[in-house]
Amino acid sequence: MSFRPQRILGIESSCDETGVALVQLGEQGPPQLLAHALHSQIDMHQAYGGVVPELASRDHIRRVVPLTRQVMADAGVSLADVDLVAYTRGPGLAGALLVGAGVACALATSLGKPMLGIHHLEGHLLSPFLSADPPEFPFIALLVSGGHTQLMRVDGVGRYELLGETLDDAAGEAFDKSAKLMGLPYPGGPHLSRLAEGGRENAFDLPRPMLHSGNLDFSFAGLKTAVRTHLVRLGWLDDAAALADPANREALVDLAASTQAAIVDVLVKKSLAALKETGLKRVVIAGGVGANRVLREQLNRACQRRGIRVHYPELHLCTDNGAMIALAAAMRVQAGLARPSLEPVFDVMPRWPLADA
Ligand code: KG4
Ligand code: ZN
């Protein structure tokens, strides 16, 4: 008989969030999230303006066991009732990945249960299956995080075809780097988005890189350079006092709104192009930038006009979390794709194309 786990523990530690979750697979029906807990390291890294890998690893070590205890207590399930321990195998920071993999493998081995390494982006990609309105295959997926910007055709679990990706900065990086130039704290995406409220989207002329490239690739490095050039022209570059001066606030709000509009515009138009090219009528938005309100509004509006359904993960599952790792493991097992191991594998993959997962 094939392996059929009921309760799957998921551990995520690829970057600056420690996430743990317990997902249950019933005989029928969709996978169910029993409990999940998350610790974000944002406050710790903020002082450095970005993630410090060594500090990230150390903090994952501090958090992962207490978070696991909390999840088990919240779910009212004992560790003995866990059938499979899943962890993020990659891509991500090597040291941070090793913490989650080490703890997952040690836990599974001590329980005599199998373990399974999961691709971080597959977690993001499948995360809308935990929402109240789950998608159906096939669909187009727009993966937009701090490290990745990809358009994918998804025909089923494990059937992912890369249609296009960024040639340089990711969409999240474009938000974060522009925000940093505007004097905003790390990670800048949500801060820039808040600053942009009420701003004029056309106040500053900013490039829409690769919009007419004829393919589905992206490039965001030029946008950051253009933001920088505007700040130089205004005389505000690296001038914290000027950036914080209320007299300059209106123009800064306009610059934030224009930057956000440029990023969103490219993401929406390329997603529509992917839908048109494949003839598919569903799109899933996943990854941290998927939490962006303007992106959601514009995409919803454009897709509604074309009879296309848009699916998102629950807002709290847009950024990194353990639930998506447990879910991806559950869906891989359900699809007969996973080969959970009883031997500690412990082989993290800091660089790992999703097509090879
Ligand atoms: O998926 P994620 O949590 O981590 C990675 O795997 O990278 O994505 C984090 C990224 C950061 O660049 C962050 O600034 C961005 O998502 N982000 C946002 C928003 N919320 C998070 N960007 C724009 N608007 C938001 N509301
Ligand atoms: Zn992520």
Image (cartoon, helix red, strand yellow):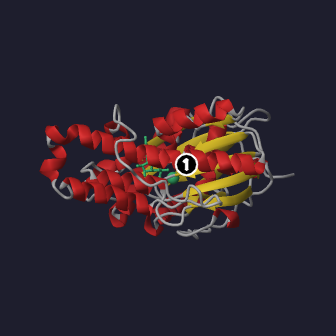
The furthest residue to the right: 1
Residue drawn at 67 percent across, 42 percent down: 283
Q: Which residue is at the front of the view, 180 or 245?
A: 245
Q: Which residue is at the front of the view, 76 or 333?
A: 333
Q: Which residue is at the front of the view, 238 or 121?
A: 238
137 horizontally vs 62: left or right: right
Q: On the rendered image, what quadrant is the C terminus found in?
A: bottom right
Residue 234 in the image: x percent, y percent? 21, 53
Residue 49 against residue 202 in the figure, above or below: below
Residue 110 in the image: x percent, y percent? 58, 58
Q: Secondary structure at mark 1?
A: helix
Residue 261 against residue 105 in the figure, above or below: above
Amino acid carrying mark 1 in the image: Leu
Residue 88 in the image: x percent, y percent? 56, 58
Residue 65 in the image: x percent, y percent? 44, 50
> Which residue position holds label 1?
267
Q: How many marks?
A: 1
Does any atom of ligand 1 lie closer than 8 Å to the CB of label 1?
no
